[in-house]
Amino acid sequence: MRIVLQISRVLVGILFIFSGLVKANDPSGLSYKMQEFFEVWGWHAFNDHTLLFSILMITFEIIAGAALLIGWQFSLFSWLLLALTIFFTWLTGYAVLSGKIRACGCFGDCIPLTAEQSFIKDIILTALILLLVKKRRDIHPLYAQSRSVGILAVVTTLTLALQFYVLRYLPIVDCLPFKKGNNIPEKMKIPAGAIPDSTVITFVYDLSGKQVEFDADHFPVDFNDSTYKFIKRYDKVVRIGNATPPIKDFVIQTMSGVDTTEAILQQQGQTIIVFSRAMEADTRYWTWEAGLRKVRSMCKARNIPFLWISSDAGTLAGQLARLKWNDVVVLQGDDVAIKTAARTNPTIYLLNMGTISGKWSYAETNKVLDAID
């Protein structure tokens, strides 16, 4: 039993460290996944705080995993991890039963798991942690108190440093569909052999002031037009497929609403595209503006298209006008697609016929200048 206990401790500790490190590579991704859950639940007030929640959760996962491995405060951390894992199990169970969330982001974008896979993983993990809680008094620290605290202090510092680095300079390992070398038009296609969602037509009727739903094969035996008042019909997903392209909702429009997606992705030669979400209102805090201005000047001198795609194009156009960037073409993009494309705000791309030749954070404009022919 002692061997099983030690193996369980090591497995759980390594799993939490691994899970945390994968997510620490892209804390913004976990932040967006939290926003997805909050949107489903109607908790819109939390959306502005999800990045902080993400950083704290990732840091805790890694610290807790390290604490399990060295046996420091084992009883405390085993209980904390049990509570966290029970919550995750409920979360993934909700995703499975509701069908509203396709993936739970347990290992970020680098190791995508379906809601069902995440739920099974959490059940197994909960069982292992229950064993650790039950036998928590049989686990003893590997090191003295001062050394254990020192180890965890180093782990905490490195974890936070990694997250702040990637938030400024983009993920170290890019697992997103917009990574360097990918062709965007190809990634917008549904993968070969993909299975579409299985749906059934569902009817919604009013019956004595209450809404009832049923499909064509399960009409009520007492159905008639006098008692059942039609409200609507919709396609209800009964089995989630995988017929979703890696890049979806990537639509680029002019300020007047003209679709320019194909024209941009088929543009021959180099094209610089800046992707951004809503920017800070006060342009004085745009610390990257001077560097990006140099990129714009070089593009202008070499006749290279310089485009700026934003999910808030109208506001951005006004901000750029105040900075005398009047000749920059500002285009409107989908917010979800831009969140995926721009993990830093803004993010700079070098495209050639829709292929991503380069991708940089706003803090790396010198590298952009070196890459322009």
Image (cartoon, helix red, strand yellow):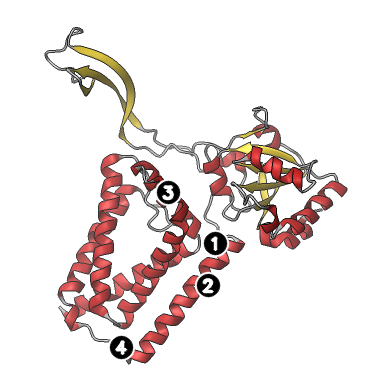
According to the picture, the residue beneath numbered tag 1 turns out to be 173
First reached walking from the N terminus: tag 3 or tag 1: 3
Would you say residue 353 is visible in this rendering? Answer: no
Secondary element under disc 2, as helix, strand or loop, is helix
Rendered location of residue 298, percent (x, y): 83, 52
Secondary element under disc 4, as helix, strand or loop, is loop
* Distance Cα–Cα, label 3 vs label 2: 24 Å
Would you say residue 366 is visible in this rendering? Answer: yes
Q: Residue furthest top?
A: 226
Above or below for 287 versus 77: above
For the point 25% across and 52% down, the residue is 90
Q: Looking at the image, how many numbered discs can be counted on the residues?
A: 4
Residue 328 is marked as none
Secondary element under disc 1, as helix, strand or loop, is loop
Amino acid of disc 1: Val
Tell me the mark number nearer the camera, choosing from 3 and 1: 3
Secondary element under disc 3, as helix, strand or loop, is helix
Above or below for 343 versus 310: below
Q: Is residue 214 left or right of residue 299?
A: left
According to the picture, the residue beneath numbered tag 2 turns out to be 161
* Distance Cα–Cα, label 2 vs label 4: 26 Å
According to the picture, the residue beneath numbered tag 4 turns out to be 142
Mark 1 is surrounded, within 10 Å at the Cα level, by few (under 14), some (14 to 19) or many (20 or more) other residues, namely: few
